[in-house]
Amino acid sequence: MRKKYLEIGKIVATQGLGGEFRVQYYCDSADVICSFDRLFMGKDKTEYEVEKARPHKTLAVLKLAGIDTVEQAKTVVGKMLYIDRDDTELPEGVHFIQDIIGLEVRDADSGRVYGKVTDIYQHGAADVYSLKTPEGKELMFPAIPEVLLETNIDEGYLVIRPLEGLFDGE
C-alpha cells in the first residue's frame, strides 16, 4: 500500500542558536531533502515551511518556519521528518524503498511465493533485496532486469525469476 507520507530523515541534533537542526537523511543525498519547500514532522505530520536547507558533511542542516531558537530546536530532536508523496515525482520504473518493503515475492514460472521483502541494500551496481520466507529464512536476490521482472506496488507483489543456483539450499 502506498503511504501518503514518506520518511525522509530524522532530526539528530541542534545546529547553532537560531533554530537550525541537523538531519540524518534517508534519501540518496542531502540535496534531495534540501530541495523540498515543505516537510512534515512527527507522528501527527505537522506541516512546516522550509526556510533554509543545506548539506553539511554527512547530514543536512534545516531551518523550519516557527522554530527560531535553540531551545525550540531541542524540542524536536529525535523526531522524524516526512515528505508528502505528491510533492515528488519518480521516473517510470523507479519506486520508493518504503513502498517495496513488505511486498510479496513470487516466482515467475511456478507462482510460488518465496516470502516478503524485508530490506533493500544499496551497494554497487544493483540493489539487493532481502526477503524472509514463511519459515523465517532470509534469502537475497539482485534487483537486476534478468531477475526482477515485475514490481506491482498497488497489488502488493514482485515477480522474480531467480538465477540458477541463487536459492539453492534454501
Image (cartoon, rainbow, N blue to C red):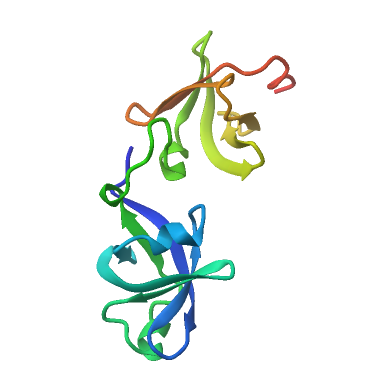
Q: Quadrant of residue 164?
A: top right
Q: Going 66% across and 17% down the picture, which residue do you hit? A: 163
Q: Quadrant of residue 73?
A: bottom left
In terms of depth relative to the viewer, which is nearer, 103 or 164? 164
Residue 69 image position (x, y, % from top left): 36, 89
**Figure quadrant of the C terminus:** top right
Residue 91 image position (x, y, % from top left): 38, 36
Residue 169 image position (x, y, % from top left): 74, 21
Residue 123 image position (x, y, % from top left): 65, 43
- Is 136 above or below relative to 19? above
Q: Going 42% across and 37% down the picture, which residue do you hit? A: 95
Q: Quadrant of residue 121?
A: top right
Whether residue 31 sits left or right of residue 66 in the image: it is right
**Figure quadrant of the N terminus:** top left
Q: Going 36% across and 74% down the picture, which residue do you hit? A: 52
In terms of depth relative to the viewer, which is nearer, 168 or 27? 27
The number of callouts visible is: 0
- Is 114 above or below relative to 73? above
Q: Going 60% across and 29% down the picture, which residue do you hit? A: 135
- Is 65 above or below relative to 145? below
